Image (cartoon, helix red, strand yellow):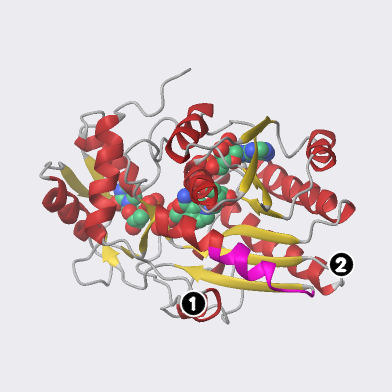
Amino acid sequence: MKKVLVTGGAGYIGSHTVLSLLKDGYNVVVIDDLSNSSRESLTRVEALAQRKVEFIHASLLDYDKLCAAFTTHQFDSVIHFAGLKAVGESIEKPLEYYYTNLVSTLNLCQCMLKFSVNKLVFSSSATVYGQGASVPYTEDLPLGRAASPYGQTKVMIEQILQEIVASKTGLQVASLRYFNPIGADISGQIGEDPLGIPNNLMPFIAQVAVGKRDKLAIFGGDYPTEDGTCERDYIHVSDLAKGHIKALKWLGEQHHSLYEAFNLGTGTPYSVLGIVKAFIEYTGVDINFDIVKRRDGDLAAFWADSSKAKAILGWQCKYTLADMMKDTWRWQSNNPNGYPNV
Ligand code: NAD
Ligand code: WQD
């Protein structure tokens, strides 16, 4: 059985991917500093999969602890989720974001090369296309200038990984550019559990629905879109998780240094109002909202062309918008306060 190191595996996308990996027969070692997650997510993943995960509580900034993981385990590949991800916070704390996201990735690459672990799946983002790119986004568009330090860390990491690959180190990288991941595992046992006030749309709606917040503020009703609110490509987190398995399998068939980026989205944009209406329709729970002024840095509309991931990785989305809404609600209503502090 192949052994995968999953950095940041206790987080939202990480925990869903670990569940998919375990179900697919992989052995999984997670390294996470729990700075934005709970150990409980992996306890639940283990219960769902009826298999164990080896957990290392450490930061990727701690090079010695990271190396120790590579000494203890013989990894076939690495999936790299770990990092800070709040766009607004990154504008307030650029140094912390550049330091954490870049140094974590550099440490990881050092260890991988030192221990001859060559296969890397990296969590990138649609934000790397920057502003003004034509839609739908295709992978042959150049890397842009992201609207935040957070986004810039993704641009920079993609560039760094490309240069390490070009230097013929043997590294093989699949950078997965996620669009807007939402939803939760169908069990309702694991899901998105943001600290404090949610920055993202779906967890905010879910917290309004469960009565933790009064009303949703919709940022901007005067965009050049059909209903005036921004449009995004929302993708079910379990489809996203599958994309990582497909990428690992594809990397497993490669024998030379390579760098490939893949968009992971559904290809269908929905507006903010469209999402609110879908949530109400598919869950039967009303959402109180106001339309307020625009949020700095938001683009009017973007969505993915994911035909490359389909053609090369054999990946396709299977979940519908209704699934995304119902699964979000199942998670939030079962766990109104997220994971318990255990
Ligand atoms: P998350 O915060 O839930 O998961 C990230 C995990 O990394 C957390 O468990 C956190 O504790 C851990 N972590 C942070 N810094 C660490 C460090 N230095 N060492 C070890 N662990 C560390 O976020 P997520 O939504 O699951 O995102 C996972 C990845 O996908 C991130 O790299 C994020 O930037 C990227 N991404 C997320 C989205 C999104 O909308 N959620 C979109 C595009 C890309
Ligand atoms: C979606 C839409 C908001 C909250 C961000 C990052 C991106 C990626 C995913 C990591 C927008 C509107 C939101 C609210 C609202 N992350 N909204 N009221 O901005 O598309 O992408 O997360 O890589 O890099 O930039 O996602 O969920 O924040 O917003 O009206 O309270 O919902 O204006 O139109 P976004 P989001």
- Element under disc 2: loop
What residue do we see at 27% from left, 62% from top? 320
| Badge 1 amino acid | Ala
| Badge 2 amino acid | Thr
Q: Is residue 314 left or right of residue 271?
A: right
Point out residue 95 in the picture as x, y percentages from the top left corner: 69, 42
Q: Is residue 255 left or right of residue 252?
A: right
Q: Nearer the viewer, residue 121 or 107?
A: 121
Point out residue 26 in the picture as x, y percentages from the top left corner: 60, 50
Residue that sits furthest to the top in the current view = 342
Q: Is residue 148 left or right of residue 291?
A: right
Image: magenta residue range: 246-256
Residue that mark 2 sits on: 169
What residue do we see at 50% from left, 29% from top? 43
- Element under disc 1: loop
Q: Nearer the viewer, residue 162 or 300?
A: 162
Q: Is residue 296 visible?
A: no
